[in-house]
Image (cartoon, rainbow, N blue to C red):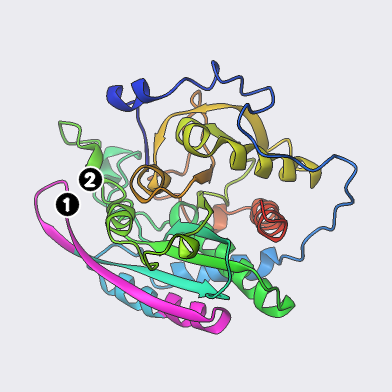
Amino acid sequence: MKSFFLLIFSLLFVSCSQGKVEGKSNNAGTEKSDDVSIVRPVFSSDSAMKFIEEQCAFGPRVPGSKAHAECAEYLYGQLNAYCDVVKRQPFEAQLYNGKKMAGVNLIAQICPDLSPRVALFAHWDCRPFCDNDIEANWHKPVMGANDGASGVAVLLEVARQLKLSGDSIGVDIVFLDLEDYGQPSFEKGEKEDTWCLGSQYLSRNPYYPANYSSRPQWGILLDMVGGKSPEFGFDQVSFHFAESYLRRVWKNARDLGYSKSFVVKESGSILDDHYYINLQAGIPTIDIIDFNQNRGFPDTWHTVRDIPENIDRQSLQMVGEVVLFSIRNGR
């Protein structure tokens, strides 16, 4: 993913400040009152951390590499253990340099016959360039402990907990490929559509049948959710396309005691997988991502320092609880 400000896109919507981020949403659905008793979900950050370490043990999961192929099989097996239906969505995409690259989205469903449904997304690939690092590291691949593996790990643990509890909830879990193969910053030009290639393909080729009831009602994208002292704000894409869900999930975070990290303020504009899922697939999807327009992404972003040792278990715990609480409460 990357921070961006497309002129055409920015003209499409009212800014977050004009939409009164701090106030109540004009189009939000009815929210439950604050006096509803909160049952904190069971989530194991140790288990999620183990999922991160197991992904990173393959090495950087750069598309086209042995590590990428081996991790795809690992993730497919993990999803099979916790979900009812699992399938691969192979595709071929054109990279920023004109070359073709094969990718595969992994799609799993829990209670596939139930509706309404919620979709949970994360990208599982790693960036081939540490282009936010010192020049000597530009052509080294990113390990992707936070940028990739953390979102996948939280969703695997969510699936494991749903399996253990026997919840009857319609959930789709989608691991997206080729998110992070966008044009490197050390090359001239600006090619926005070279990012998020897996979600672009998925949005043009839906994995669900044509009938409306099988399409997820809404979605959550997780990206870089394992860093230390994260700040999750209202990015402009989420605010524009899925404001009511954004506010509800942030309210859930507040009720769980996580308002310090889930902040109700504009975080800026970013290009991430939810952009295409919202715009092309038509699934209102929010992005839980550590980013704000002042400091940008975490300091490990696209560097050799994005390793398991820099993951904070408390961040995984927090995000896992918020996701589980939100999908169990239908919001």
Q: Residue at x 36, y 42 (%)?
A: 279
Q: Give the position of the N terminus as an image quadrant.
A: top left
The residue most toward the left is: 98
Q: Which mark is residue 318?
A: none
Residue 314, magenta (yes or no): no
- Contact (Cβ within 8 Å) of mark 1 with mark 2: yes
Q: Is residue 3 left or right of residue 85?
A: left
Q: Residue at x 68, y 67 (%)?
A: 46
Segment tinted magenta in the rendering: 74-101
Q: Residue at x 42, y 56 (%)?
A: 144
Q: Few, some or many C-alpha atoms within 10 Å of disc 1 (few <14, some 14-19, many ≥20)?
A: some
Label 2, secondary structure: give it.
Answer: helix
Camera-side residue of 131 and 116: 116
Camera-side residue of 10 and 195: 10
Q: Amino acid at mark 2?
A: Thr
Name the N-terminal-most of marks 1 and 2.
1
The residue wearing badge 2 is 194
Can residue 186 be spotted in the picture?
yes
The image quarter in which residue 117 lies: bottom right
As drawn, 185 above or below 86:
above
Q: What distance separates the C-alpha of mark 1 from that of mark 2?
A: 6 Å
Rendering coords of residue 111 (x, y %):
58, 76
Rendering coords of residue 260 (x, y %):
72, 35
The residue wearing badge 1 is 95
